[in-house]
Image: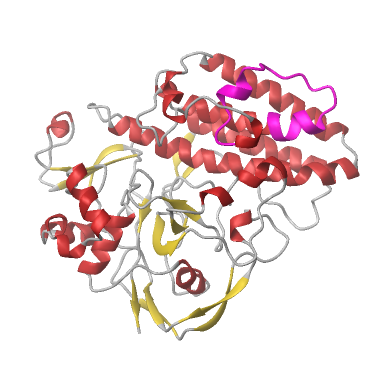
Amino acid sequence: MLRVEERDGRVTSDPVRPTAMRSEGDAHDATSWQVRYEAVRAETLARAAPLSAEDQCIQSMPDASPTKWHLAHTTWFFETLLLRPHAAGYRTFDPQFHFLFNSYYEALGPRHPRPQRGMLTRPSLDTIHAYRRHVDQAVDALLRSTDSSTLDAIVPILELGLHHEQQHQELLITDILHALSCNPLLPAYLPAPTTLAPTGATTTGWFVHAGGIAEVGHEGSAFAFDNERPRHAVLLQPFAIADRPVTCGEFAAFIADGGYRRPELWLSDGWAAVQAGSWQHPAYWLAADDPRLAAHDRSTDPWHVFGLHGVQPMAPDAPVSQLSLYEAAAFAEWAGARLPTEFEWEAAAASASMRQMSGHVWQWTRSSYDPYPGFRPLSGAAAEYNGKFMVGQLVLRGGSVATPTGHVRTSYRNFFPPAARWQFSGLRLAKDL
């Protein structure tokens, strides 16, 4: 059964499954990789399980993908990058799938256009499940028959594939939530919990960092994406950073003070986005007079929020979510602060005084998504995984309620264009000293 863990609000399966993270010393253990593979693949199906076949075919905007496509593409990854090069005698499930479910790998040939993924009513959902079983059986056979030298060769792509699937597990949730938000019935992805998760928000504290040289980026032999490396030194000026994210109640005060009507608070492109999209509040917020609330609890609460459990009264102490970078920066300007850089965020993350660093919302930073000094992409087809997106994007740090357990690290660099607001994205404030 899928649920939102009431202790911390995370989407997880029941029981909690092992993660895909590699432990030191088990790189040559085929059995441990088999366990990890099965766990990750089962988690994807668990996240899709609450959805009907109709739910799983819909694409609500070009930036989102249907659930059925996520199920197929993550399978395509293992078939194309693991089985076809390394499993002797592997039989491709359907040659047409190579075209249908390639995402953006130019080196692997043409692909079905991303904005038209919702048109793929065929193959059926049952066929996609059969595709997953076919590939899973082949991966199982490969791991059972491989020797240590072959395992050394396939572990990098197998491990990348597991983390790639975990990324799509989160996208599966955020994409279907956007689709359900477009339905006038505002249907819930999951039933409402019997008790609300505690938010833990209190008066904002500030962690003060003296500045100086800091080491950032991933270190060690455990898995990290290529965009987290190499570890390197950065110079930080003295700064302070809030010990928790901005809450819904605080953002409601920004709205009440005319935040969406004051161009002086906004970046130029952000103000243009406000005007073009008629933004008046975060995505998925509903004002008390919204006609879509007619079929829901019409309490006296001034705001309701559509989320994983459908429509709920806005929780003032919960971290605000579904914000674009533009909205986050405007709030920071209104609050007399700014957004942190990704390096300030990472330097502060080691402090025990910091709260809600992950498991609630991804947190916008003011850092452009650029390569680290000495960046080298992965080899082979996987070279296209991250590097070619390093333009026009901003970095988010942390992890959200939809991020799979064990998938985030302090050095993890998520990234989206600044206008994106369908993710579980919020902010924490920073100040110069």
Q: Residue 304: where, in percent of width, then height?
A: 20, 44
Relative side of 422 to 23, left or right: left
Name the colour scheme.
Answer: secondary structure
Q: Position of residue 140 (x, y in %)?
A: 77, 30
Q: Which residues are magenta?
A: 79-105
Say if the magenta span includes residue 218: no
Residue 290, located in which quarter of the rendered image?
A: top left
> In the image, what residue occupies the spot 72% across and 41% down?
158
Q: Is residue 268 left or right of residue 94?
A: left
- In the rendered view, does 295 fall on the left or right side of 403? left
Residue 318 seen: no
Q: Is residue 300 left or right of residue 131?
A: left
- Asked if residue 95 is among those painted magenta in the image, a careful observer would answer yes
Give residue 345's position: percent from left, percent from top: 46, 69
* Image quadrant containing the C terminus: bottom left
Which of 279/137 is in front?
A: 279
- Taking 366 as reference, is 224 above or below it? above
The one nearer the camera, 247 or 98, is 98
The residue at the point 18 percent across, 32 percent down is 296
